[in-house]
Amino acid sequence: MKILIILPNWLGDALMATPAIEVLSNTYPDAKFTFIGSAVSVEVLKYHPKCEACYIDKTKQKGSRIVNTYRFAKKLGLFDMAVSFRNQPHVSLFLKFIKAHISCTRSAWHSKILLDKTLKVSTDKHLVLQYKDIATCSNNTDAPPLKLYIKRHNFKHPALGINAGATYGSAKRWLPKRFAQVAAYFSSRFDIVIFGSQNEENTAIEIVDELKRLHVNNYTNLAGKTDIAQLCSFVGGCSLFITNDSGPMHIAGAYQVPTVSIFGPTRFTETSQWKNSKNKLVRHDLKCAPCMRRECPLKHHDCMNTITTNEVIQAAKAIT
C-alpha cells in the first residue's frame, strides 16, 4: 500500500499529524509512506519505520509553480492513497496530477473544483482530530497520542528543559527573565537545559544572564546548536519541560514529558498538548484572547505579561 502524505509546514503541526499517520499505519500494515513537506516537517517524520521516501517541496523556488508541481507529481509516480494535511490551491493541483486511487484532503473551493471527493472537517476541535479526520475520511473522534521514532537522550542528571521561543511570533512568548526565575527555583532538583533556534539565541542569552544574576550555574545553553533530530532527542530526555505554545511543546508531548505550557494569543483548545497526562496549561482568560496575531495588536501583551512566575512554578510542582 503506497501512501503519499503531504505534511504541514510547521514543526508543531507536523507533530500533531503523527496520530493520523499512526492510524494509517495500523489500518494498512503493509503501508509504505512517502512524505512531502518543508525541510523541518520532513526531517522530523523521516524516521518513521514505514517511510520509504521523503521530499522537500521546492515547487515555488524557480519558474512556474504550476509547471514545477506537474513535473514533481509525475516524477513521483502512482500511489494507492494520497493524504494532504495542507490546504492550498497548489496542493489540490498536485493531488490532481498524482491521480492516486484515493485522495484525502480538506474541503475548500480549490479542492472541490479539482478533486472528486473532499471532506468537510470541523475546525472547532483539536487539530490532531482534524488531521485524523482527513486521513481517515471520517469524522469519528478518537486519535492516539503523538508519536516520534527518535531515541530520547539520557541525561546524567534530571533535566529541566526551558523553551522561551516560538517561531510564530513575539505574541506567543512569555518573558525570558521569568523563564529564568522558574528555572532558578528548580535548579536544586534539575540541571537546566535551554532550547531555542538560531533566531532565538538572544532570548537564550537573556535567560543565561538572569540565571547568572541569580547565582545558578548548572545550565546548558543549546539554543542554535541542535538539528531537528537532536532537538527531539534532548527534549524527550527531559524530566520536566516549561515552554510557550510551540513545536518543542509538541515534541515534549510526544515523549510524555511532564510539561507546563504557557498560552496567550492562540487557541489552546486547538493546539495544546495532545494526550499527555502530565501537562499543565497556564493561561489567562482575557476578552482580547485568543487574537491569533503574531504581535499584540493592543501593544500591552497582557495575555502573557500578566502570567506570574509563581503561577508557572505551582503548575510545575503539581506534575513533578
Image: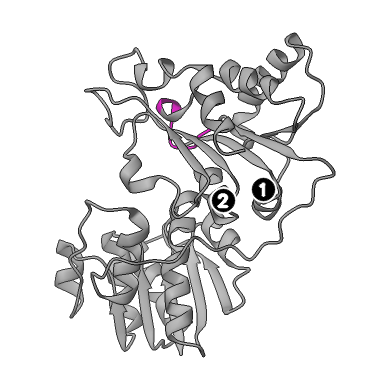
Please name which of the two marks, 2 or 1, marks the residue nearer to the observer: 2
Q: Give the main secondary structure, helix, strand or loop, of the magenta stretch.
A: loop
Relative depth, front residue between 282 and 15: 282
- Judge from the rendering whether residue 263 lies leftward or rightward of residue 115; answer left or right: right
- Judge from the rendering whether residue 46 lies leftward or rightward of residue 110; answer left or right: right
In the picture shown, does residue 220 fall above or below 273? above
Examine the rendering and report whether any part of residue 230 can be seen. yes
Q: Residue drawn at (30%, 79%), measured in percent from left and top?
A: 103
Check residue 251 in the rendering and tell me which mark sits there, or answer none: 2
Query: Which SS class for mark 2?
Result: helix
Identify the mark nearer the N-term, 2 or 1: 1
In the image, which residues are magenta?
165-171
How far across and how far down the image is residue 131, in percent? 34, 63
Q: Amino acid at mark 1?
A: Leu
Answer whether residue 306 is magenta in the image: no
Check residue 231 in the rendering and tell me which mark sits there, or answer none: 1
The answer to which quarter of the image holds residue 102 is bottom left
Asked if the residues shown at circle 2 and circle 1 are in contact, with their CB atoms under 8 angstroms apart, the answer is yes
How far across and how far down the image is residue 248, in percent? 56, 44
How far across and how far down the image is residue 156, in percent? 85, 44
Examine the rendering and report whether any part of residue 86 can be seen. no
